[in-house]
Amino acid sequence: MSVLNHTHDPAARSWLASANQPGTDFPIQNLPFAVFRRQGTAEPLRGGMAIGDQVLDLQALATSGGLSGLAQQAAEAGAQDSLNALMAMGPGAWSALRHAVFGLLSSAATDAQQQAVAACLVPQSGVTYGLPARIGDYTDFYTSIYHATNVGKLFRPDNPLMPNYRWVPIGYHGRSSSVQVSGHGFRRPKGQVLPAGQTEPVFSACQRLDWELELGVFVGQGNNLGDPIALDDAEQHVFGMCLLNDWSARDIQAWEYQPLGPFLAKNFATTISPWVVTLEALAPYRQALERPDHKQDDLAYLRSEHNSQHGAVDIQLSIGLTSQAMRDAGQPVHWVCQTSYRHAYWTLAQMVTHHTVNGCNLQPGDLLGTGTLSGPTLDQAGALLELTQGGKVPLTLPDGQQRTFLLDGDEVTIRGWCDRPGAARIGFGECVAQVLPAI
């Protein structure tokens, strides 16, 4: 697990003015990774790091002569069209590159260093993003006890939480081929649904389309088949975290999910943010794991003092929407939920460890979803299914429109950030996608 060092100093400043602006997502203490190219070009995708309102081009940096040793090797790996090679190098390489770039961007950098790095910067306003990695596998977990309970109450009022929930970090294997980066819309899915009061299903477009407010976890170094990852080693296998929206077709899901769980209701689209924030950057925001039931008797492989005292991360999360009419009128995003990752019942280390305890091998670039991250009160619910109580209590938008579930043209935005006195603000950028009509 990352410990505090000079790169977390909240007083540190960059010679790039936009990195020092109050409220920026990307100060010098962050330096997250993405894959990008300049807008309107066919140039190859390559890795970059965010600083202020700019992208530091790792391909250009790797040829600038400003790095050496492990940091240079990491930059060369990150200069490729995906971050998989960099992810595979492990935390020593990730940290070496981050520390070297911190020095080059610091206000203490020499004039020559500043000039060399300035030549490697590209405005974020002028780029398009690709997926950060070639995602071999995608697994979505169910780590919020509040979300599990809220959803359970809708279908099992007398027994909302299944008895295995407090023992097993539950997950399912999703579809990696339909993961898209922020900014790409998706078609409303079709499938079988069972209309209310009917005994036979019909084939139709989804009418109960929902979002799920989540975080994504990118695997760095993997493990060999048959070799589980111990709990206190798990975070050494995590490259970083991003925002994630696991779109859900609730009416399709209700008909198909028994007995084998999610299928067509989940595999049509998942949207992630382009920027991946490293665990090292998040070190100032680690917290003790706090559970509402105070359960501490997890099975031995999921339990350690280190995980109990430092396993949670206080990442603030917010989700909102705009209708087509709102955008046409120039209205801003209507934010409907704010919550925090600190409310999760299972930590990211526990997700990794449980995933591999049976010998399953993770690989660089694999993606894990946290599941919907609802908090303890209804205004912290991370899905429309919860916010509208199964569609019974509509949300009212600023222009008077109402929503129980999403309509065509709706655009959903997720933001994430960490902020507290005595630490630099660390942001994740945005995760945005629009619902397009079914074909």
Image (cartoon, rainbow, N blue to C red):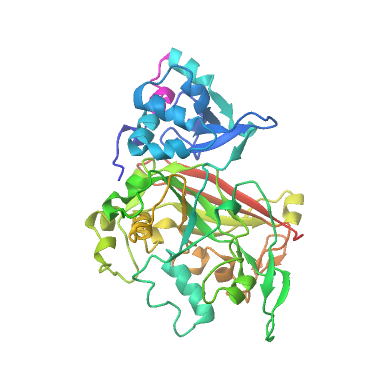
Asked if residue 223 is positioned above or below residue 196 in the image, the reply reads: above
In which quarter of the view is residue 55 placed?
A: top right
Residue 105 lies in magenta, yes or no?
A: yes
Q: Nearer the viewer, residue 353 or 332?
A: 353
Asked if residue 31 is positioned above or below residue 410 in the image, the reply reads: above
The count of marks equals 0
* Magenta residues (range): 101-111
In which quarter of the view is residue 111 placed?
A: top left
Q: Is residue 329 visible?
A: no
Q: Position of residue 330 (x, y in %)?
A: 73, 48
Asked if residue 356 is positioned above or below residue 23 in the image, the reply reads: below
- Residue at 42% x, 66% y is 170
Asked if residue 179 is positioned above or below residue 63 in the image, the reply reads: below
Q: Position of residue 79 (x, y in %)?
A: 50, 29
Q: Residue lying farthest left?
A: 305
Q: Position of residue 36 (x, y in %)?
A: 58, 35
- Residue at 29% x, 55% y is 231
